[in-house]
Every structure is written in structure tokens, then in C-alpha cells.
Amino acid sequence: MKLFQSHFNIMKKIYKRQFKIWGYTVSHSFLILRSPMKYKDVVGFSEEESHNIDIEFFAVAYLDIPNILSGIELGEVKDNIPEKFKRYVKEHKYKVFEIKSEQNIYHIVAGGYSIGKNTWDIEDRISNMHLKHDEILFSI
């Protein structure tokens, strides 16, 4: 775990919730990973899960993640960038993000991301870019 953590030069975000690829649009290179909220009548409900957490990546150039991620650590790789991503960083000024889930490491190359908290049932910002999160938790 120390090796993984040493790659990060900025704030690392850790979530113990399950995330899913909620949506991706090729036309805008926009990706949403969502940890959906639970409703009060669901077994195991807690206030901690009474809202969605959306991680929204913009200007996505490379994507290597499974459909479901159980618990994640998310951060930007600034040092020891894997060779296959160096041209994205050098030529296009993209950022390389690393996601660790269940002892596996995945990558997303994008312009940046934000993390928002909301209580939308089925809505998302791919289908309606005018939606506003209840709270922005982090943005880069």
C-alpha cells in the first residue's frame, strides 16, 4: 500500500462505497462514476449512504477500469508516470489518475475531475448538464 500511496503528490480521496460506471459520453469525453444512494427502507441503510457520490471526469483520453469498483482510493500520479501515458501528459497536458480497488490499480487519463454529492434518483449531468450538486467535495 505504501508504494501506491507514494505516487500521489496531491490529496488522495478514499471511499469505502461501491462505485459503478454510471455514464460516459464520447461527444464530450465525460465520465461519471457513481456510488448510488440507499433509501431508508433498504436493509443496511445508513446516513452515510443517504446520497449519491458522483466522480465526474472531463476530457477523458484513456479509460481502464471495470464496471464496478468496490471501495476506491483515487489520486493523481505526478511521479513515475507509466510510459504509455507520458505522451498524453507531455503533448496534451492531461493528468493521469490512479484508482485502487480491491488491490488492483486502474488508470484514467483526463483533464481533471470533480466529486459531487447529490440526491438525484436517476438524473445525472450527462443527461442534464444544468444539474447542480448539493455539494462539491473536491475538484481538480
Image: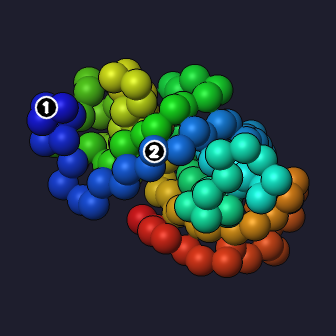
Quarter of the image with the N terminus in it: top left
Q: Is residue 42 above or below residue 136?
A: above
Residue type, label 2: Lys
- Element under label 1? helix
Residue 129, percent from left and from top: 79, 67
Q: Which residue is identified by label 1?
A: 3
* Comparing labels 2 and 1, the label whose residue is closer to the camera: 2
* In-front residue for pair 23/16: 16
- Which residue is denoted by mark 2 in the rendering? 16
Q: Is residue 128 left or right of residue 50?
A: right
Give whichever of 40, 11 is nearer the camera.
40
**Helix or strand or loop: what does disc 2 sit on?**
strand
Q: Is residue 124 visible?
A: no
Where 2 sits versus 10, above or below? above
Residue shown at the point (64%, 26%) measured from the top left: 67
x and y percentages locating residue 81 in the rendered image: 23, 34
Task: Name the kind of residue labelled 1 in the image.
Answer: Leu
Checking the image for residue 30, the label placed there is none
Report x, y in % for residue 127: 87, 56
In the rendering, at what x and y percent does residue 130 appear? 81, 74
